[in-house]
Every structure is written in C-alpha cells, then in structure tokens.
C-alpha cells in the first residue's frame, strides 16, 4: 500500500478556543477555566488520550477475528500525568507533556486469559498512535506564512 | 502547581467505530472505508494531528501578549505520512505510526518577522503534545480487566 498522508487544519477562534477540521469532520478544543480557557471542549492533551484510546480500540476491533478473540465488549480507560509548571512556566527539568500515560483495557470475552493477554500485547505493538507517543517522531515546523 | 492527571475513556461501538468520553465532552472516531471503517468520524491518527494543531494554536493564543506578539489571526496546517503496511500488515522495518509530521503556521500580525519566528520556536518548544510526539513517552498498559 502506498504511503498515506493525513491532514488537519487548526484555527484560533478566540480566547483559547481552537477549531480543527479533518476532511468533513471538526472538533472544538479549549482549556478548562483553571488553565485559562472557557471550557467549551476537551483540551489537546485530553484529545491525545482520546486518539490513543480510540486507536487501541480500533486495532482490537479490526484484528480480533484474525486472532481468534471473541470480542463482545471492549473499552480502555486512560490517564496521563502532566506537570503544568512545564508548559505554563518553562520550569527547568519539568517536561511539557505527559511524563506517563496509563492504559487499562476492559474486555468481555469467552476467550482465555492467556489468549487475551497475547492479543493485548499485539494491540499495543501495532497501534500507530501508541508508536508515535512511545517513540520519537519528527515534527517539522516550517517558517510561518504571513497572511 | 501540582501534577495534573487527565483522563479519557474509549469504548468500542461496532465495526471500527469508537466513542471517547473526556469529562463532559465526547468524540466519535472511525476509519475511512478504504481502511475498513464506515467513515463516521476522523480516525485516531488524524485526531492526533488535531491535538497537535490545537495545542500549538492554544500555546500561541495563551502566550502572544507576554511575548509582545500582535496575534490577529493564527492557524496551522498539519500533514503526517504513514505507511499502512506497518499497522495493517506488520511489515518489518516499517513503523506503525507517522514517520514524519509537518506543520505550517499561518499568522496575521503587525509584529516583525524576526519576533514572529522567535515566538514560533517558543510555541513548538512549549507545546505538550509536540513534546509527547517528538520525545519518548512511557505508555503503560496494565493487564486487561475481564468484565
């Protein structure tokens, strides 16, 4: 399959509100009031957790049959820890993003615990968003365009 | 400021549709039909670009005044390249996630080009989602809970 290029466009609205378009879809992001926003949408680090959780779940749904896993129900709970002194204040030694993300998968299945555990390891190893969070990814910002 | 923990919960609906809840917000993700889905929402790698674009834009909006930048309009266009042979087929040597993400910022401002370029470098260096994509982040998956 040829390399696929995915695209998005994020535009400042006002305050800390941002609307992003992806093909025919859109999402509003904002910050909660304690981080200076007006709380009209999830914030970007929460959206990153949503992307990771959805990615793991889609991989589970897409590959269950191939791995002989009886997938009756599936969901993941995600948590990420972040010290706001990093991105808000640039405090030395504090990273700006999550320093740890925890994922708890939940499954309703008739498959064996052993088979499910192997399948979970496969899911995590195959999920693109997990790859991009776990490993270095080149983010290249070009010079700004003045409009 | 104490460490903040952000949370999300992603639940399989049917096919490749997944609904994620974050506080009072929710987002549907799915895959386009050429990747096996039914195209009812952006997919997780697109959502990851949306998180990155929104993060960069929120940091721009939040810090413009402090950096004496006249921010009249601001948006970013994002692109990420991914080889589906990675996550779909596990092809050796092909990573599952984006191997490159490109960001093009657009700004309407009366500030000087030099000041804007410095500000752009600041934005990228401070954005939490950019940090989590650019650098390794621990993603810890616990054993599955059987329900």
Image (cartoon, coloured by chain):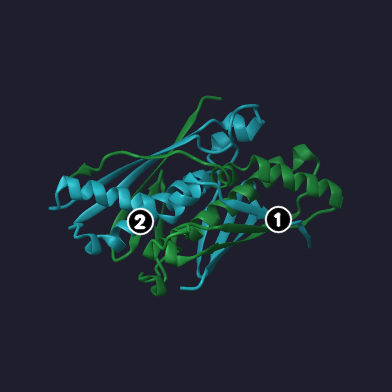
Chain colours: A green, B cyan
Q: Position of residue B67 (x, y in %)?
A: 23, 60
Relative to B8, B122 lies left or right: left
Position of A64 relative to B138 (above/below): above
Near-viewer residue (A46 or A80): A80
- Which numbered disc flags the more N-terminal residue, 2 or 1? 2
**Quadrant of residue B145 in the image?**
bottom right
Position of B114 relative to A36 (above/below): above
> Which chain letter matches label 1?
A
Extreme-front residue of the structure: A92
Extreme-left residue of the structure: B110
Near-viewer residue (B113 or A86): A86
- Disc 2 from disc 1: Cα separation: 30 Å
> Which chain letter matches label 2?
A
Instruction: Note whether residue A143 is visible.
Output: yes
Alpha-carbon neighbours of circle 2 within 10 Å: few (<14), some, or many (≥20)? many
Q: Could you tell me which secondary element the residue under label 1 belongs to?
A: strand
Q: Which residue is mark 1?
A: A74
Position of B3 relative to A75 (above/below): below
Q: Are marks 2 and 1 on the same chain?
A: yes
Residue drawn 51% across and 44% down? B45
Near-viewer residue (B44 or A36): A36
Residue drawn 47% across and 59% down? A93
Check the picture and name the quadrant holding the C terminus of chain B.
Answer: bottom right
Q: Position of residue B24 (x, y in %)?
A: 50, 70
Q: Which mark is residue A19?
A: 2
Relative to A125, B116 lies left or right: left
């Amino acid at each position: 399959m040829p390399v696929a290029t995915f695209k998005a466009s994020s535009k400042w609205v006002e305050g800390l509100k941002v609307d992003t378009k992806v093909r025919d879809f859109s999402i509003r992001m904002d910050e909660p009031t304690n981080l200076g926003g007006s709380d009209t949408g999830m914030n970007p680090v929460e959206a990153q957790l949503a992307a990771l959780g959805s990615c793991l779940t889609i991989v589970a749904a897409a590959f269950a049959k191939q791995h002989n896993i009886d997938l009756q129900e599936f969901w993941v709970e995600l948590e990420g820890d972040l010290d706001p002194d990093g991105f808000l204040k640039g405090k030395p030694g504090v990273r700006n993003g999550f320093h740890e993300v925890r994922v708890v998968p939940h499954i309703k299945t008739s498959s064996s615990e052993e088979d499910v555990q192997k399948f979970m390891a496969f899911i995590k190893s195959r999920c693109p968003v997990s790859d991009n969070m776990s490993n270095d990814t080149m983010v290249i910002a070009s010079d700004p365009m003045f409009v």
